[in-house]
Amino acid sequence: MTALLELDGVTKRFGRVVIAENLSFSVGAGDTVGIVGPNGAGKTSLFGLISGDLAPGAGEIRFSGRTVTRLDAASRCRLGIGRTYQVPRPFADMTVFENVLVAAQQGGGLRRRASYAAAAEALERTGLGGEANVAAARLGLLQRKRLEIARAVATRPALLLLDEVAGGLTDPEVTVLVEIVRGINAEGTAVIWIEHVVRALTALVTRLICLSGGQFVGDGDPAGVLANPKVREVYLGSEVTASVVEAALEQEPSGQPGREPDPERSTS
Amino acid sequence: MAWVNAIIQGILTGGLYALFACGLSLMFGVMKVVNLAHGDLAVVAGYIGVGIIASTHMPFLWSVPVVVVIMAALGYALQRTMLQTALSRGELTTLIVTFGLSIVIENGLLQFFTANTRGIGVGSSLVSSSFKIGSQIQIGWLLVVVFALALVVLLSLQYFLSASKYGRLIRAVADDREAAQLSGADYRHVFGIAAAVAFGTVALAGVAYGMTTVIQPTTGTDTILLFAFAAVVIGGLGSLWGTLLGGIVLGVAQQIGAQINISYEVLAGYVVFLAVLVLRPQGLTARRSQS
């Protein structure tokens, strides 16, 4: 069986800054992969390489057995690679429904009725059904993040790239978001999720990758990767991190005021 | 009464100016292309109309959709080739490229059609017929027809942009090209469609101008482009109905100027244009959204 997404020796540099250094990995259909790493590690750029926003300097990217290295972002989207932006970028002048409709018609390749149904379903799934006719510019942060996901989902992706969708959200909001992503994954969509909110990742993913300086410093089951001293060093820094890691592993709230325990979390 | 007459004439002329301006506004709003060849392309459309009627003896009304389709196809092709290439080198490059295109078109027209003026024959009955309101106000039917055409074009554009699939796409790409790519939209194709629509309105502008007066190779730059710019700036950049408001303000200013002294006609228009630039640079209708 061929993998859904394969990167083979992908390298990208901007001048002397290394974005990706000979990266090779594969993701199977329906997989859930988390990516962590310090700022500037090349996480978002890696998404750019996969989604087609960036062209690699060397190496090959295959999707569903097809080489997509030279395809532009729109073509890759139509093949089934959906992506969200770290900072949501809705079409501000348009309604929430129109935002998603464009994705369903262009990325999803759907027409008329089918596209309307797919757009409505994507909104329903992300809990935006009630905001369908609101101008996207008027949405709050959580709603914008939901719209970002809804738009990606409406393109009917086989692979969904989530870029820090949990950033800036409260704990209960993160829990809601994790459930939305879990629902999308349950229908067979593979998910690669970049996130600083580690507990959001550990609640869902079965594989965790730590990226630093364009290279993998850890790849495997989440508990193992987070316990890896190298990972702790590059990503988590030093002492601060011990508590973060423990919190993530023990599935306990980190003790900050205003946070609520989350019974749903599991590292399975 | 002469003043009322002047104002009515000005308002109706504003419809023609709105036709000049809406394509320019659309190209800028979507692609950030300031098309300096805009007026020359309108003149080309006029010449195509003259040529089609002369060579096929097609009735005037039939020739209009033909010219529109030819210009729309030209718009798509030009956008996908020359303008897209220029855009990928930066928005300023499009200024140079369209300026060059303007020069080439003007000189090409001079070469092939000489500097003689030409008009589009729509039958003398429409050109010369008018109706009277009271004893002193006389309104030509031709201007009324052109004003109505402008209204229809603007209403159609608004419907197209707000309710159609491609209109939605154009708005999405104009808003955020990269995000639209991630939604699966090929922005180059969408740009091509926007250019085709803009060139369709350019064709109507050229034909309408050829109907109301005469065209010659330099009309594009010295009249159509400048009036289009003035209307867009007065009305507010990126606003569709602003082009009509801008066109009307320009038209009324010109007619009032002409009423004072016939040599002030064009000058009065530009005085208002400058006043708007100084006092309200965002135009009379401020744009709804952030830039």
Image (spheres, coloured by chain):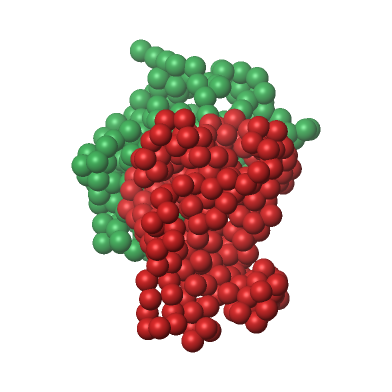
> Across the whole image, how many numbered discs are drawn on residues?
0
Chain drawn red, letter?
B
Farthest residue in the right direction? A16
Left or right: B194, with B58 as reference point = right
Which image quarter holds the N terminus of chain A?
top left
Chain drawn green, letter?
A
Give the camera-side residue of A219 and A240. A219
Q: In this view, does A156 lie above or below B33?
A: above
Give the camera-side residue of B8 and A38. B8
**Residue appearing at x 44%, y 58% in the figure:** B127
**Residue appearing at x 58%, y 64% in the figure:** B231
Left or right: A267, with B15 as reference point = left
Q: Position of residue B287 (x, y in %)?
A: 52, 67
Farthest residue in the bottom direction? B1
Tell me where residue A136 sits by quadrant.
bottom left
Q: Can residue A58 be seen in this view?
A: yes
Q: Is residue A88 visible?
A: no
Q: Where is residue B7 in the image (x, y as percent from the top left)?
A: 51, 78
Which image quarter holds the C terminus of chain A?
top left
Q: Position of residue B230 (x, y in %)?
A: 63, 64
**Residue appearing at x 53%, y 84% in the figure:** B3
**Residue appearing at x 36%, y 33% in the figure:** A157
Left or right: B108, with A67 as reference point = right
Give the camera-side residue of B152 and A14. B152
Give the camera-side residue of B284 and A124. B284
Q: Position of residue B195 (x, y in %)?
A: 51, 42
Tell me where residue A234 sits by quadrant.
top right
